[in-house]
Image (cartoon, helix red, strand yellow):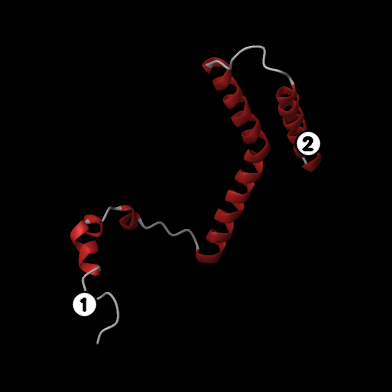
């Protein structure tokens, strides 16, 4: 799957959208048809961009592993509830820390 197939797929999606816009509406847009159009657009975008995004993510993970090794730090995943305390945030806005001192 190369660049030509991506361009052809994107061209077909744009062509179908422009053709739909050029037609006068026969009736109002219903919820079912709107959901179908949205899911069809999501599938088209996923099919066109998905492989490229997966390749970029894999390359990023590979480069990170080559640079620093595979380091897993589960303690970094534990929540620090003190950082979510509103009193600590308000304390940083106290007059002793805001603005120039005279």
Q: Earlier in the sequence, mark 2 or mark 1?
A: 2
Q: Position of residue 32 (x, y in %)?
A: 54, 15
Q: Which is more toward the observer, 35 or 5?
A: 35
The residue positioned 29% from the left and 77% from the top of the image is 99
Q: Which residue is mark 1?
A: 96
Q: Is residue 83 above or below residue 4?
A: below
The residue positioned 64% from the left and 35% from the top of the image is 45
The label number, if any, that marks residue 65 in the structure image: none
Q: Which is more toward the observer, 54 or 49?
A: 49
Q: Residue furthest left?
A: 87
Q: Position of residue 94 (x, y in %)?
A: 21, 70
Q: Position of residue 58 (x, y in %)?
A: 59, 49
Quarter occupied by residue 14: top right
Q: Is residue 88 above or below residue 42?
A: below
The residue positioned 78% from the left and 43% from the top of the image is 3
Q: Which is more toward the observer, 26 or 4?
A: 26
Task: Give the structural element (helix, strand or loop) at label 1.
Answer: loop
Q: In the visual, does 11 lie left or right of 72?
A: right
What quarter of the picture does the C terminus occupy?
bottom left
Q: Position of residue 30 (x, y in %)?
A: 55, 15
Task: Give the structural element (helix, strand or loop) at label 2.
Answer: helix
């Amino acid at each position: 799957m190369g660049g030509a197939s991506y361009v052809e797929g994107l061209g077909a999606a744009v062509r179908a959208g422009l053709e739909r816009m050029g037609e006068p509406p026969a009736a109002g847009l219903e919820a079912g048809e709107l959901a179908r159009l949205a899911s069809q657009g999501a599938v088209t975008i996923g099919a066109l961009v998905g492989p490229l995004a997966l390749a970029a993510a894999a390359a990023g993970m590979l480069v990170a592993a080559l640079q620093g090794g595979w380091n897993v730090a589960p303690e970094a995943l534990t929540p620090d509830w003190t950082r979510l305390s509103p009193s600590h945030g308000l304390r940083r806005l106290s007059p002793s820390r805001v603005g120039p001192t005279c």
